[in-house]
Image: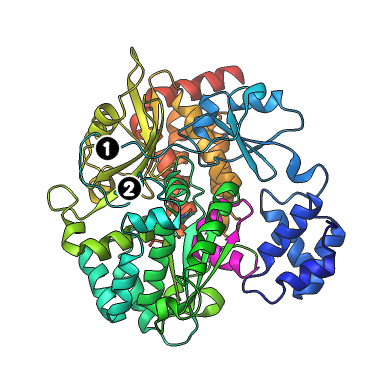
Amino acid sequence: MDSPTNEELIARWQHEPAPLLPLLHAFHDRDEYLSTQAIEAVAAGLKIPVAELFATITFYHHFTREAPGQRAPRVCTGPICTLHDAHALQASLDGASTMPCAGRCDGPIPVLKGHEVLIGVHSDHLAAQPSPLPIPNPGNYEECVFAEIRAEGRSSLMGYRLSGGYEALQQAIAINPAELIELITASQLAGRGGAGFPTGAKWKAVAEAPNSPKTVVCNADEGEPGCFKDRTVLEHDPHAVIEGMLLAARATGSSRAFIYLRYEYPEICTILENALAEARAANLVGPAILGSDFSCEFYIRRGAGAYICGEEGSLLNSLEGKHPYPRNRPPFPVTHGFENLPTAVNNVETLASVPQIVRRGAEWYQSLGLDGRPGTKIISLSGDVQRPGNYEVPFGLPLKTLLYEWAGGPASDHSIQAVTMAGLSGGFLAGSDLDTPLDEPSIRQRGSMLGAGGIMVFDQSRDMVSVAHQAMEFFAEESCGKCFPCRIGTQRLAERLTGSTGPDNLETWKAELVDIGEVMKATSACGLGMAAPFITDSLLKYFPDQVAHRVQSQSEESK
Ligand SMILES: Cc1cc2nc3c(=O)[nH]c(=O)nc-3n(C[C@H](O)[C@H](O)[C@H](O)COP(=O)(O)O)c2cc1C
Ligand code: SF4
């Protein structure tokens, strides 16, 4: 079959909602890179100034501008893959470049090649592999999101229905949207994408906001290093996410639903397309759902590689085809979201919890946590533990129980030196703070946060200053550059962590690190710049000896 012409591609996408990303992907897939002619054609077709479009395209990691383009391999060099010698793998692969954490920290190193994800540790043993089902929790605690995920055939519509799927949608259609919001509010479900905002309150705000059409957005960007839970949920339980989105749409009065999927999960895109086709054929999405007056159309939009696009304002700008800077707040997306209209942006895990809550009730969900804490959280655990993977824990489970009893602890003759929290955004926990229960307030008291629930483990053999340096380089690379405290602060902190810049005097060096971090926390415009100093603060708190050693050896070398 002949490749589509520029005109055909533009005609296919021009009148669709949120057309820029799929149109760029269509050109990128056809030619394997985005030529100047392609960019000019898209700019003319969508009436975007060429210079603006060029700036937007070059902001993303994965849109290539010359051959071999997307065929060239990209190797994950996130914090855990670095421990597995990802740089050596990259060096051994012809024409390979690096990419930030690709969300597969529970297995060997991922290599992205076109629409294929290969995994392995040696260049001659790379293969595509489905990811494992979540490990059943050894504590025998009742689960919510993973309760049915291991059921036979769960990812197909038939398998999903056999294990209770779409019952919640039927229940929700039979009741009034306000009752549905009350149920979710009573369950105390809060956002699992990092910020922990109460889901019921968010939906109420969208439902009550004037103007329409309203929109639901599933945030499947999952760019935080060390987080890979959303990938597992989407891969093995795509209908649970679709049903959660339908329930969000029903509650908020939304008629449009987008899934914003990170570029690094190409196989999940196919899984979602198939699941949506099944749901559409069964009258579960689209017009007059199950013969009711409720209609909702679904769209999948693939990102192109930018951590900041997980931040909801940035995600909405990206969907709208604008430069993906975070938006100033207020106004918030609940009143001024997609196309400036009311929008509920929710994380994959949040949405996948909803059908279970509707089926089993608010009290059931509340009762899942320990000592009166409501609900559960999926933790993506990786690094120096024997059984890395996704675990659904009751809120309040001691971190040490997860690390040692559930995940088998470190390799024999090793000990755990530190863990990161919230992927990288919560910095490190170490020493007696590893005793914390897993819940946001307890972890905040220790100067960190649980966030999206990525925990990376480092044993005593790891150089924590190097780990911190790599983390800060990630934030510096991913800072969108909109505000200077973060744009410059992340760079200065990364440079200082190499020990190659800053004063020779240790106390002055440390004071500068703290000072830069304080300014960033107080003045950054979004969570990236506010969170990055958690890395340096916790490094100074837990590892003063390693810091002193690094600064002193660096100053001796420079003499
Ligand atoms: C730098 C940054 C990156 C983020 N990345 C993600 C992400 O990948 N996925 C996600 O769901 N939320 C992410 N968030 C949080 C979103 O802005 C938003 O709070 C969330 O999607 C709301 O959904 P929830 O209420 O269900 O958690 C990020 C926030 C920041 C500041
Ligand atoms: S804090 Fe950083 S990532 Fe956020 S808007 Fe400012 S420059 Fe961009």
Helix, strand or loop at mark 1 = loop
Q: Which residue is mark 1?
A: 137
Q: Quadrant of ligand 1?
A: bottom left
Depth check, front residue: 468 or 178: 178
Disc marking residue 394 = none
At horizontal 42% and vertical 66% (from top left) the residue drawn is 245
Q: Secondary structure at mark 2?
A: loop
Image quadrant assignment for residue 161: bottom left
Q: State the image coordinates of residue 128 (x, y, percent, origin top left).
A: 59, 35
Q: Position of residue 386 (x, y in %)?
A: 36, 24
Q: Is residue 326 visible?
A: no
Residue at image location 44% in from the left, 36% down from the top = 132
Left or right: 95 as drawn, with respect to 139: right
Earlier in the chain: of badge 2 and badge 1, it is 1
What residue sits 28% from the left and 74% below the top? 181
Q: Is residue 8 visible?
A: yes
Which residue is identified by label 2?
146
Range covered by the magenta-colored residues: 301-322
Q: Where is residue 263? Give x, y as percent.
A: 60, 51
Identify residue type, mark 2: Phe
Amino acid at pointer 1: Asn
| Extreme residue in the left direction | 371
What is the C-alpha distance between the residues marked 2 and 1? 10 Å
